[in-house]
């Protein structure tokens, strides 16, 4: 019964989405405020309905209602509760439902938090959200219905894919979707601006918090996904340049560019048209990612052709939204007033260069991902574009970005002083150089690239704070004054410094892979294996029974200079229902580095194949991601960026000058 | 949904290889000569496992990848250079096996993309900078000057 009502709520949500996508726009076009005001309750109702549908599906998973096809195919009565919950989105149908639920949540958030926004802008934005929602709800109901029943219901489910039975599944997809779908709000804002033909600094101020929110989630989602792949897949890699990973990296690159160009637009009213383009691009790339992942086109062009319903459906959605928004852009954008002066040496120019480089990165990833597909479709020739290509093309671009970051950050708006900015970055450059030289001296003959990388990382981390420090420091002033100044600095300045330093920390982790140690060996019990400064000894093998698996684990002692410092238990798990064996890597964090052990086959003489790594500073890769996201949160807490701040500003201005109020509130 | 999909795909590979837990580079493959082994790993990292989804033979757990890894090591043991090993495999399987597609007519656009974007974007940016050179602000009109004076005199907080 609950399942049926959930199904019904899903269908109702489609109807509400249809209303939301027609009536408010009609209202703003015809000046009928009654129709316009439907947008807000419609968005909230839609969210409640989808929330109910999602809760109903979750209920079916929790009580193991195997009459539902998606539950039967992905669950098992003995599966731990946390995976029953996470398993709701561990399959195509459920994950699409999560996708639209998050879409509706963002719509409802704009409806509730955007009370101070210009009415027309809010109504139009919610209209565009309605279009997206309508399209994806159709997709779900017609091709990927999670509520399909099967009679008679099987007695037992087929269990969730063992590789997905992990805490990563509980966190990664929701985070990533919050990032992907969060960019839809920005897209809707952009299209709404194009419809109404009004685009000003206030628009940039409304939209910036949403850009930041989407960016924060996407950053965390990517970092989380990378760590999950690292510890689940069992060979110690953390980024594979897989098309599916690229699909999340592209919106991140475009979103990062957007974050910076929106700042220029807000402060200087320049780069308006470009900012709109990036807003459309970011969401288009998110849609493209959804298409790539959901259509099966990546596995091979042939598997796409064998069951094209879903793929073609998403392709139609994709081309309608991207094509439609770009056509609207081409038609309306030229009529938007372009303003803003641009001095060659200034913060805004530096940000324009940042946008240029990030766009180049994004275009490179895009062509690298789609080129093989396009070439095969056009000529039938198959080529591969893998990690070596991306490392070679993106490496130099990243190095250039990192070199310019601290300098750009030190430039003032309007008219910057390149010499001064370079001077402020000098300390950072010297720091990086010293670190690199010391490293060369200590570890002579070490990998060159890693040394350069680490030097760059130090330069970036120190340089990120150069601007903030120069604004705090005052010659001859007591610490108290400097502290007061530090607190008084805009939070967005701190946020930028922290986020930039986060990239430096990630870079540090990436560079340090050059000093990693790897051993592939058949290990006897009690035999010590040297791993960098540590030694790993597998003491014994034990069997253990889990809720829906059985495992063999290797009790391993890690020692340094003869003294035990840690133990790890890498394991091999067998899942009887799916007849699969997965290797659970044993990982222990020592300082910022990790010992990583994954097991292979056992031999009759008691020895076991193992792959062991010492990965110095490897955790810095993901810690850097978390620091970047934290920088975003600090920025978000800036008074001027808080959602709703623009509304208060309007109210204050209105109170001060009643005559100007109607204009300001427009 | 980054690794999720990847994991799903991997699990298909897994399923095909059950029951034995096949693995990436196994101990019995490793060459006794560390130099040769390092070269073998280096070459393997640039070769695609043809039965997998965008994985190098060095990472892959497929039987096919293992066969190729052994083949690479065999050729190296014969004293061939890295280039010769790669050429041998390209002759056998085509360019598809190289994860770094060589630059030729078909891939001009692929390799040229970063330069193309940087060049067009850079030119557009320079053009805009020239067009948007700050022009000196127009002098205030009499009305504006009066208003400014009034505002300064009024001495009220804005």
Image: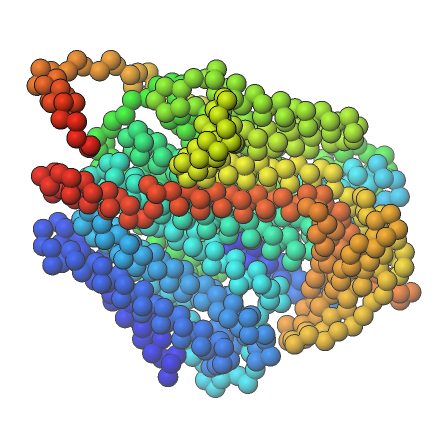
Colour mapping: rainbow
Q: Residue shown at 62%/58% (left/top)?
A: B10
Using the rendered image of the protein, determine whether residue B129 is visible from the camera's viewpoint: yes
The image quadrant of residue A44 is: bottom left
- In the drawing, does residue A386 fall left or right of residue A204? right
Is A220 situated above or below A49?
A: above
Q: Residue shown at 65%/76% (left/top)?
A: A547
Q: Residue shown at 68%/43% (left/top)?
A: A617
The image quadrant of residue A10 is: bottom left
Is B124 situated above or below A72?
A: above
Residue nearer the viewer, A154 or A468: A468
- In the drawing, does residue B102 fall left or right of residue A412? right
Residue nearer the viewer, A419 or A43: A419
The picture places residue B136, in percent across and down from the top left corner, at 24, 13
The picture places residue A146, in percent across and down from the top left corner, at 42, 71
The picture places residue B147, in percent across and down from the top left corner, at 11, 22
Q: Residue shown at 83%/49% (left/top)?
A: A560
* Quarter placement of the N terminus of chain A: bottom left
- In the drawing, does residue A282 fall left or right of residue A464? left
- In the drawing, does residue B2 fall left or right of residue A544? left
Using the rendered image of the protein, determine whether residue B89 is visible from the camera's viewpoint: no
* Quarter placement of the C terminus of chain A: top left
**How many tags in the picture?**
0
The picture places residue A490, in percent across and down from the top left corner, at 39, 36
Residue nearer the viewer, A122 or A335: A122
């Amino acid at each position: 019964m609950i399942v049926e009502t959930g199904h019904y709520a899903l269908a109702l949500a489609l109807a509400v989405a249809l209303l939301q996508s027609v009536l408010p726009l009609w209202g703003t076009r015809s000046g009928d405020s009654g129709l316009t005001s439907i947008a807000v309750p419609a968005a909230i109702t839609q969210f409640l309905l989808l929330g109910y549908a999602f809760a109903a599906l979750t209920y079916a998973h929790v009580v193991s209602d195997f009459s539902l096809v998606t539950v039967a195919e992905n669950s098992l009565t003995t599966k731990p509760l946390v995976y029953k919950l996470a398993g709701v989105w561990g399959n195509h149908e459920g994950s699409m439902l999560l996708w639209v639920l998050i879409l509706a949540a963002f719509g409802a958030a704009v409806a509730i938090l955007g009370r101070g926004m210009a009415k027309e802008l809010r109504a139009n934005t919610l209209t565009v959200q309605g279009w997206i929602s309508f399209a994806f709800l159709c997709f779900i109901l017609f091709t990927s219905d999670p509520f399909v029943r099967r009679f008679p219901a099987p007695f037992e489910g087929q269990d969730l894919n063992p590789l997905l039975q992990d805490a990563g599944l509980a966190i990664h997809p929701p985070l990533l979707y919050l990032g992907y779908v969060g960019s839809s709000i920005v897209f809707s804002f952009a299209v709404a601006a194009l419809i109404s033909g009004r685009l000003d600094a206030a628009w940039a101020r409304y939209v910036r918090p949403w850009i930041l929110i989407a960016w924060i989630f996407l950053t965390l989602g990517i970092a989380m996904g990378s760590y999950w792949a690292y510890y689940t897949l069992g060979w110690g890699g953390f980024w594979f340049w897989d098309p599916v990973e690229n699909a999340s990296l592209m919106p991140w690159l475009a979103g990062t560019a957007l974050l910076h160009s929106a700042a220029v637009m807000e402060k200087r009213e320049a780069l308006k048209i470009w900012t709109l383009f990036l807003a459309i691009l970011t969401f288009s790339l998110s849609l493209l990612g959804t298409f790539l992942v959901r259509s099966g086109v990546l596995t091979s062009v042939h598997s796409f052709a064998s069951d094209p319903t879903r793929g073609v459906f998403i392709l139609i959605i994709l081309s309608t939204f991207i094509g439609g928004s770009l056509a609207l852009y081409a038609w309306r954008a030229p009529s938007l007033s372009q303003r803003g002066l641009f001095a060659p040496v200034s913060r805004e120019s530096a940000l324009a260069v940042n946008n240029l480089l990030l766009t180049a990165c994004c275009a490179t990833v895009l062509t690298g991902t789609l080129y093989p597909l396009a070439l095969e479709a056009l000529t039938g020739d198959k080529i591969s574009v893998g990690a070596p290509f991306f490392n070679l093309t993106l490496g130099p671009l990243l190095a250039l970005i990192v070199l310019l970051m601290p300098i750009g950050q030190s430039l003032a708006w309007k008219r910057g002083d390149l010499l001064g900015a370079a001077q402020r970055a000098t300390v950072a450059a010297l720091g990086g150089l010293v670190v690199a030289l010391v490293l060369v001296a200590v570890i002579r003959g070490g990998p060159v690239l890693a040394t350069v990388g680490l030097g760059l990382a130090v330069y970036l981390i120190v340089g990120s704070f150069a601007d903030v420090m120069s604004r705090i420091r005052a010659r001859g002033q007591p610490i108290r004054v400097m502290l007061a100044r530090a607190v008084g600095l805009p939070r967005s300045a701190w946020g930028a410094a922290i986020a930039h330093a986060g990239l430096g920390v990630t870079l540090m982790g990436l560079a340090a892979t050059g000093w990693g140690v790897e051993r592939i060996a058949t290990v006897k019990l009690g035999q010590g294996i040297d791993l960098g400064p540590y030694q790993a000894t597998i003491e014994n093998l034990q069997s253990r029974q889990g809720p829906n698996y059985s495992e063999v684990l290797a009790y391993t002692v890690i020692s340094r200079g003869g003294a035990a410092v840690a133990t790890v238990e890498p394991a091999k798990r067998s899942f009887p229902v799916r007849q699969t064996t997965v290797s659970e890597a044993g990982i222990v964090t020592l300082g910022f580095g990790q010992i990583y052990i994954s097991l292979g086959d056992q031999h009759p003489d008691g020895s076991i194949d193992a792959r062991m790594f010492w990965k110095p500073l490897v955790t810095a890769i993901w810690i850097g991601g978390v620091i970047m996201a934290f920088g975003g949160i600090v920025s978000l807490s800036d008074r001027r960026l808080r959602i709703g701040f623009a509304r208060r500003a309007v109210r204050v201005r209105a109170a001060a000058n009643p005559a100007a109020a109607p204009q300001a509130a427009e | 949904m980054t690794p999720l999909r990847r994991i799903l795909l991997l699990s298909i590979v897994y399923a095909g290889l059950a029951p034995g837990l096949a693995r990436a580079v196994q101990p019995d493959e490793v060459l006794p000569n560390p130099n040769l082994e390092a070269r073998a790993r280096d070459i393997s990292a640039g070769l695609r496992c043809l039965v997998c989804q965008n994985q190098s033979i060095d990472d892959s757990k497929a039987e096919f990848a293992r066969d190729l890894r052994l083949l690479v090591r065999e050729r190296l043991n014969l004293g061939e250079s890295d280039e010769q090993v790669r050429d041998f495999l390209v002759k056998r399987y085509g360019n598809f096996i190289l994860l770094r597609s060589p630059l030729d007519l078909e891939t001009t656009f692929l390799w040229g993309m970063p330069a193309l974007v940087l060049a067009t974007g850079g030119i557009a940016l320079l053009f805009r900078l020239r067009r948007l050179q700050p022009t000196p602000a127009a002098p205030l009109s009499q009305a504006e000057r009066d208003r400014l004076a009034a505002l300064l005199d009024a001495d009220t907080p804005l």
